[in-house]
Image (cartoon, rainbow, N blue to C red):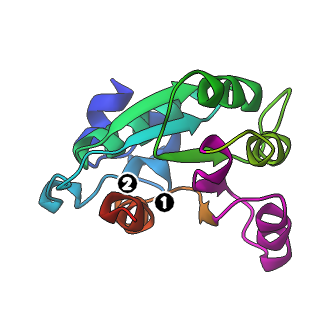
């Protein structure tokens, strides 16, 4: 079971080498999360991610940190979710079919208060600074590079957890 392996900090099967040696990647993102303490204040995290494995892993990380995750599979679904209910933060995959994270973030910034002011953190494999600048120009507050580690996610969520 992919999620069970991820929760134990082990490699996911597709990332294993033929010799059984784990390869760097998403299978190790939960490593060390057992030491993480639940947050003093649970936040509602909207996650827009089209990849099922990434959805499972990010949900596990969010919940292990003591927060609540609401998963949607596209940028359009993220915008609709924000119109329907309040969230504390959005984790937005940049590259999704249909409406991508850049367009969705622009639409979120055009929503009425308070939805337009929600922190939006991009999720991407793009590491070039010029790509991150494009994501920020679209309205993303920060960008997390995939594979996202539990430590990086906890650090990104810390100011949201702390509140205003």
**Which of the pair 142/64 is nearer the observer?**
142
Mark 1 crowd level (few <14, some 14–19, many ≥20, 10 Å Cα): few
Mark 2 crowd level (few <14, some 14–19, many ≥20, 10 Å Cα): many
Q: Kindly identify which residue carries mark 1.
A: 24
Q: Of tags 2 and 1, which is closer to the observer?
A: 2
Q: Residue at x 13, y 61 (%)?
A: 35
Q: Residue at x 76, y 49 (%)?
A: 109
**SS class of the residue under badge 1?**
loop
**Which of the pair 24/142 is nearer the observer?**
142
Can residue 21 be seen? no
**SS class of the residue under badge 2?**
helix
Q: Residue at x 29, y 36 (%)?
A: 5
**Which of the pair 23/8 is nearer the observer?**
8
- The quarter of the image holding the C terminus is bottom left
Count of picture labels: 2
Q: Do callouts 2 and 1 mark residues in contact (Cβ within 8 Å)?
A: yes
Q: Magenta stretch: give its range.
A: 114-141
Vertical side of 97 occupied by 120: above or below: below
Q: Which mark is residue 28?
A: 2
Residue 85 in the image: x percent, y percent?
Answer: 52, 25
Picture quadrant where residue 126 is located: bottom right
């Amino acid at each position: 079971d992919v999620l069970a392996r991820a929760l134990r900090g082990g490699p996911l099967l597709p990332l294993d080498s033929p010799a059984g040696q784990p390869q760097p990647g998403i299978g190790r993102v939960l490593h060390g999360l057992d030491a993480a303490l639940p947050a003093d204040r649970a936040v509602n995290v909207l996650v827009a991610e089209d990849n099922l494995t990434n959805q499972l892993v990010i949900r596990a990380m969010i919940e292990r940190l003591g927060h609540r995750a609401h998963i949607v599979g596209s940028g359009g679904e993220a915008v609709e979710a924000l119109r329907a209910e309040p969230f504390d933060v959005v984790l937005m995959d940049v590259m999704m079919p249909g409406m991508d994270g850049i367009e969705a973030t622009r639409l979120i910034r055009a929503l009425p208060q308070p939805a337009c002011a929600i922190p939006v953190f991009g999720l991407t494999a793009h590491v070039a600074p010029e790509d991150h600048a494009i994501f920020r120009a679209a309205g993303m507050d920060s960008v997390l590079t995939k594979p996202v580690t539990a430590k990086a996610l906890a650090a990104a969520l810390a100011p949201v957890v702390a509140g205003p």
